[in-house]
Image (tube, rainbow, N blue to C red):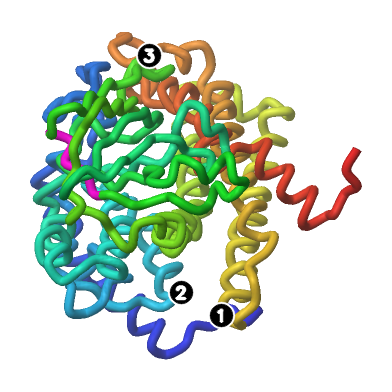
C-alpha cells in the first residue's frame, strides 16, 4: 500500500496536532494527568475515582473537543462534525493515541448512537437528542446483548408489544456498559415474536430509544473481576416506551444497527500506538522497580516479541485501510485485528506483572503497589478482551469458515 498521505489528509493531521498542542496541556493542568487514584472505590458511582468515577473529567474533555469540532469528526458538518474520510478517522485515532488524550464522556453516543439518530431519525428526534449527545449533556448506553442470545445478536428475545401509542417492554439485557449512569439508551427489541420460530430471526427486530428512568426498568450493576461495576443488567417489566421513540421503521432494527456498528472498529487504528506506548512505559518503569528483570533472557525475548507483534498489528490495520480506500472488502483483516488486540492486550498485561516482580500483583491501596496498583488492575481487566467486540472463539470460527475455508467435521 501507499503510506503517503493525500494533501487534504496531511492538512487534517496538522490541524489536529496544532489543536492538541494548544488545548491538551491546558486541560491536563486543570483536570490532572490521570483519571484514577489510590483512593478509588469499587462501586463505580459517578463522581468518584476509578473507571466510572472519571466521568466529569471525560465530560469536560468531550466539551473541549466539541468546541473545536473534534468530538464527532464523522458527523455531518451541520451537526458539528467534519464528515471525516476513512483515512482521516485513522489519522484521528493515531494522533489521539499518540497524545495519550483523556477518554471521552460518551463513546457509544458519538460513534454509534448519534450517527444512527442522524441517519434514521425524524427531524424531531434529531433536534431532541443529537445536540445533547454531542455536548455531553446526557450519557447514553447501547443495549444489544442478552443472556439467552449467546454471541448471536439476532437471537434476542426482549419483547416489545404495541399498545396504543406505546410499546410495552418485557425482557432482559446484559453486559450493558455504563447503563447505571445513562439517561438514555438505544435498545434492540423484538416486535415480531414469531420471527425466530419462523427461521427469520433477523426480521422483526426494532430499534427503540429508551428513557432509563422510566417505570418498569431496573438497572443492576455487575461487579467485575477488578471489583468495579462498569457493566449492567437491565430488566424490563411492563416498561412503556412511546412509539415516537422508535428509530426507523418497525422491524428495521437490524438494518439500523448494522449500518453503524462498523464504527466500533474505527478506533482500532490507534490501538497499536497505544500498546507501543504502554510497552515503552513498562520497560522504563521496570528499570526503576525491578532492573534485574531486564537482564532476564526470557523476559527480553518477550519484550521483543511484543514489539514485533505490535508492529505487525499496525501494518495489518493499514492493510485493512488500504483495501477500504480501494473499495475492496477489508476481509479478513478486521477479525484478525480483533484477535491481535485480544492477544496483545493480555500478553502486555502479563508481561508487565512479570517485569515488575512480586509487588506488581498488589492492588490499589497497597502501600507498595507499583504505579498505584494500575498494572494489577490492568492484568485483571484485560481478560474481557477475549469477549468484548466479539469473542475469540467466534472470531476464530469465522476466520476458519470464511477465510481459510477449513472443512467442517
The one nearer the camera, 192 or 352, is 192
Q: Are marks 2 and 1 in contact (CB under 8 Å)?
A: yes
Q: Nearer the viewer, mark 3 or mark 1?
A: 1
Task: Give me the residue at 25% from left, 30% from top.
Answer: 36
Extreme residue in the front direction? 164
Decide if residue 132 is in sight here. yes
**Element type at mark 3:** loop
Q: Position of residue 237 (x, y in %)?
A: 26, 25
Q: Tell me the crowding category of disc 3: few under 14, some 14 to 19, or many 20 or more residues within 10 angstroms, Cα based.
A: many
Q: Which residue carries the number 1 mark?
A: 325
**Element type at mark 2:** helix
Q: State the image quarter where residue 213 is shown.
A: top left
**Element type at mark 1:** helix
- The quarter of the picture where the C terminus appears is top right
| Sequence-wise first label, 2 or 3 | 2
Q: State the image quarter where residue 145 is shown.
A: top left
The label shown at residue 262 is: none
Q: State the image quarter where residue 315 is shown.
A: bottom right
Query: Does residue 266 belong to the magenta stretch?
Result: no
| Sequence-wise first label, 2 or 1 | 2
Magenta range is: 209-213
The label shown at residue 86 is: 2
Q: Position of residue 67 (x, y in %)?
A: 11, 67
Amino acid at each position: 500500500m501507499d503510506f503517503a498521505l493525500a494533501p487534504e489528509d496531511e492538512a487534517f493531521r496538522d490541524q489536529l496536532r496544532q489543536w492538541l498542542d494548544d488545548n491538551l496541556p491546558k486541560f491536563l493542568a486543570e483536570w490532572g494527568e490521570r483519571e484514577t487514584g489510590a483512593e478509588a472505590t469499587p462501586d463505580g458511582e459517578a463522581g468518584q475515582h476509578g473507571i466510572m468515577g472519571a466521568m466529569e473529567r471525560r465530560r469536560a474533555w468531550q466539551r473541549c473537543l466539541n468546541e473545536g469540532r473534534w468530538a464527532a469528526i464523522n458527523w455531518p458538518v451541520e451537526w458539528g462534525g467534519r464528515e471525516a474520510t476513512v483515512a482521516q478517522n485513522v489519522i484521528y485515532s493515531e494522533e489521539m493515541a499518540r497524545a495519550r488524550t483523556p477518554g471521552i464522556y460518551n463513546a457509544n453516543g458519538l460513534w454509534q448512537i448519534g450517527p444512527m439518530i442522524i441517519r434514521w431519525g425524524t427531524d424531531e428526534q434529531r433536534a431532541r437528542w443529537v445536540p445533547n449527545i454531542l455536548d455531553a449533556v446526557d450519557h447514553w448506553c447501547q443495549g444489544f446483548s442478552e443472556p439467552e442470545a449467546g454471541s448471536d445478536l439476532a437471537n434476542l428475545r426482549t419483547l416489545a408489544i404495541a399498545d396504543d401509542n406505546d410499546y410495552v417492554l418485557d425482557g432482559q439485557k446484559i453486559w450493558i456498559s455504563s447503563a447505571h449512569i445513562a439517561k438514555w439508551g438505544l435498545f434492540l427489541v423484538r416486535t415480531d415474536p414469531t420471527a425466530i420460530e419462523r427461521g427469520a430471526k433477523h426480521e422483526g427486530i426494532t430499534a427503540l430509544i429508551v428513557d432509563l428512568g422510566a417505570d418498569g426498568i431496573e438497572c443492576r450493576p455487575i461487579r467485575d473481576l477488578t471489583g468495579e461495576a462498569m457493566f449492567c443488567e437491565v430488566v424490563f417489566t411492563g416498561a412503556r416506551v412511546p412509539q415516537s421513540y422508535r428509530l426507523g421503521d418497525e422491524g428495521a432494527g437490524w438494518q439500523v444497527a448494522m449500518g453503524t456498528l462498523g464504527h466500533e472498529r474505527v478506533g482500532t487504528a490507534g490501538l497499536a500506538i497505544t500498546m507501543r506506548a504502554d510497552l515503552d512505559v513498562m520497560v522504563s518503569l521496570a528499570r526503576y522497580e525491578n532492573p534485574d528483570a531486564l537482564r532476564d533472557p526470557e523476559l527480553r525475548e518477550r519484550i521483543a516479541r511484543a514489539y514485533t507483534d505490535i508492529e505487525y498489528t499496525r501494518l495489518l490495520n493499514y492493510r485493512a485501510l488500504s483495501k477500504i480506500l480501494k473499495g475492496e472488502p477489508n476481509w479478513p483483516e478486521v477479525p484478525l485485528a480483533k484477535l491481535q488486540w485480544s492477544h496483545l492486550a493480555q500478553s502486555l498485561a502479563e508481561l508487565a506483572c512479570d517485569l515488575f516482580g512480586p509487588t506488581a500483583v498488589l492492588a490499589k491501596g497497597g502501600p507498595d503497589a507499583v504505579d498505584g496498583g494500575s498494572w494489577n488492575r490492568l492484568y485483571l481487566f484485560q481478560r474481557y478482551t477475549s469477549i468484548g467486540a466479539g469473542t475469540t472463539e467466534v472470531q476464530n470460527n469465522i476466520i476458519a469458515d470464511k477465510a481459510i475455508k477449513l472443512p467442517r467435521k
